[in-house]
Amino acid sequence: MYYEADKNSVPVSVGSWMFMLLVTALPLIGLIMVIVWAFTGENETRKNYFRALLAWIAVAVVAGVVLALVLPKSPHIQKQIQGWTHKA
């Protein structure tokens, strides 16, 4: 899909990307800013990037919850983990 010459077609500068990546590395502030940048502003490329990042965060959270629910109920997996952690 091609856009006319407007603010959506203006590329994000390297300096802007560096700033955004630095901010997203901050623990709580980064998550808040990812949400803000995903839904505000006029640059569709930037918004799509941060929406994709939010989707990956959601996948990671779901995977973490599933693992947290499955691991305690599996004695085979618990023995395997104990074997890894108790090697001397």
Image (cartoon, rainbow, N blue to C red):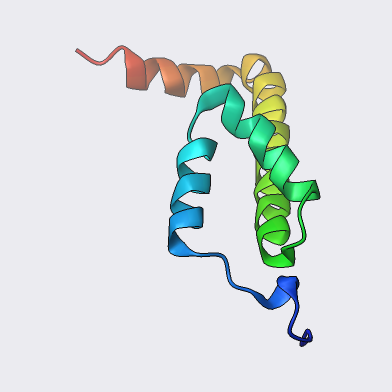
Residue projecting furthest to the left: 88
Label total for image: 0
Camera-nearest residue between 42 and 25: 42
Residue at 65% across / 29% down in the picture? 64
* Left or right: 35 in relation to 25: right
Q: Quadrant of the N terminus?
A: bottom right
Residue at 70% across / 46% down in the picture? 37
Residue at 77% across / 61% down in the picture? 42
Residue at 62% across / 21% down in the picture? 71
* Left or right: 53 in relation to 27: right
Looking at the image, residue 3 lies above or below residue 67:
below
- Using the rendered view, name the quadrant where residue 32 is placed: top right
Name the spot of residue 11 as percent of width and height, x first. Answer: 59, 72
Name the spot of residue 27 as percent of width and height, x first. Answer: 53, 25
Looking at the image, residue 20 lies above or below residue 10:
above
Looking at the image, residue 4 lies above or below residue 12:
below
Residue projecting furthest to the front: 6
Name the spot of residue 77 as percent of width and height, x first. Answer: 54, 24
- Using the rendered view, name the quadrant where residue 75 is placed: top right
